[in-house]
Amino acid sequence: MNERQRPSEIVLGVSGGVAAYKAALLVRLFTEAGHGVTVVPTDAALEFVGRATWEALSGRPVQTGVFENVHEVPHVRLGQNADLVVVAPATANTLARAAAGMADDLLTNTLLTARCPVLMAPAMHTEMWEHAATVANVATLRDRGVTVLDPAVGRLTGSDSGPGRLPEPEQIAAAATALLAGHPRDLSGRHVVVTAGGTREYLDPVRYLGNRSSGLQGVALAEAAVARGARVTLVAANVAVPTPAGVELVEVVSTEDLRRATLEHAAQADAVVMAAAPADFRPVSFADAKIKKRADGQAPTIELVENPDVLVEVVRQRDASTRPGVPVVVGFAAETGDANGTVLDHARAKLARKGCELLVVNDVSEGKVFGRTDSEAVILTAGGEAHEVPLGQKSALSHEIWRHVADLLA
Ligand code: CTP
């Protein structure tokens, strides 16, 4: 959870499934982020993980019914005071009780009294998840504004596998963070590809041509897309920053690697954001052994050849495909003004040349942007609009970019 948060009050409902043990890790993630957590298990949940575990991890007493500590009126107080209610795992039974508006234990009472965002992370066998009753219950809950995550696909409790696994605690925590920050889940069900970092073109086994891109902007974009509900593939070129939770990482070194990986994933994606700085040139040849100094003192001449423009190829692949307008393609431009035009003049020409839908323009005149966590930018649209994004964290700029992408996809 890199995004800065104020401490919040979270009610963590746990219902009765084997995946209840993973909710213990979720308590840890929430408390380590500084949030207050009240765990409200169902009676069935306590068959899987006992009361002592929840009390020790949350540092708070735990109850399941409405007839304990009645003088504190917990059946209304918990829901009213919460900033967020998370139910993980949400079993088919708990989804059904929530959808029907039942109030037969402390958790369902809390769901009825909560006026804050509610996040549910289902876990059950595939047959139960796909049953018409569960499908209808999930639709009802989503209609009412509850965020119901799709379960992960993989090994289930027995030897079988399929959709029904509880999403990883880090993914649930990321969705919770987004809800607490008020971000919409407008990329839910979308697959996005983000490129990050700077490519390297090796001259010999130890030397390369590279650039100053840190990968911070691309990583912030990936994290923001996860928060807005997307499935995210991060094509990362020499990025030292840790990969955000819930992101599929594809590591690349050179512009050709980046080209191959990006085109492959772009073919199925809804959006591609090219935040990477691919090297524009590569050495014509690669020396298998380290290039030695010459006895005559002459420096070697390195002959360069131009690399393909990956962004242009992504646009070309999209335009030749059978999916009109998808993926939405976003480019970045680091520009300086000069005698031939302002930063925006150059950026407008680049947007037209590259054929993308959006171009995020950074003014790099005075060493701004590189390696910093903050950034100011202008988002140019193919329609000619220029949206200024004031100086702020790269995560804020990322959310602005995704807001525009989500609008275009809608
Ligand atoms: N880009 C790319 N492939 C390259 C170079 C750049 O896909 N070989 C992408 C970058 O990821 C970025 C955008 O193109 O999103 C703009 O890159 P930039 O280097 O500013 O553009 P150039 O076309 O190289 O223009 P310039 O002549 O200003 O360097």
Image (tube, rainbow, N blue to C red):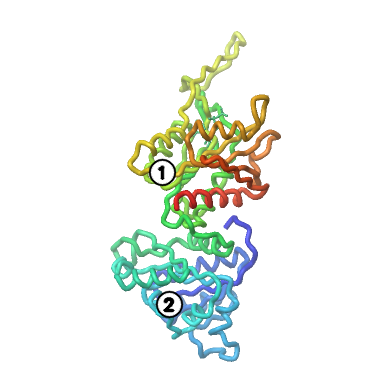
The spot of residue 4 in percent (x, y) is 63, 58
Name the N-terminal-most of marks 2 and 1: 2
The spot of residue 384 in percent (x, y) is 55, 40
Q: Residue at x 49, y 75 (%)?
A: 13
Do we see residue 377 in this rendering? Answer: yes
The kind of secondary structure element at disc 1 is loop
Judging by the rendered image, the residue that carries numbered circle 2 is 98
Label 2 – label 1 distance at C-alpha: 39 Å
* Residue 177 located left or right of residue 251: right
Front of the two marks 2 and 1 = 1
Q: Residue at x 56, y 30 (%)?
A: 210
Of 199 and 146, the residue lying toward us: 146
Of 328 and 255, the residue lying toward us: 328
Of 274 and 246, the residue lying toward us: 274
The spot of residue 28 in percent (x, y) is 55, 66
Q: Residue at x 37, y 43 (%)?
A: 324
Q: Looking at the image, how many numbered discs can be counted on the residues?
A: 2
Residue 379 placement: quadrant: top right
Of 213 and 328, the residue lying toward us: 328
- Asked if residue 391 is positioned above or below residue 164 in the image, the reply reads above
Which residue appears farthest toward the top when viewing the image?
296
Q: Amino acid at mark 2?
A: Ala
The 10 Å Cα crowd at callout 2, few under 14, some 14 to 19, many 20 or more, is: many
Judging by the rendered image, the residue that carries numbered circle 1 is 325
- Asked if residue 110 is positioned above or below residue 368 in the image, the reply reads below
Q: Residue at x 30, y 70 (%)?
A: 132
The spot of residue 3 in percent (x, y) is 60, 56
Q: Amino acid at mark 1?
A: Gly
Label 1, ligand 1: CB separation under 8 Å: no
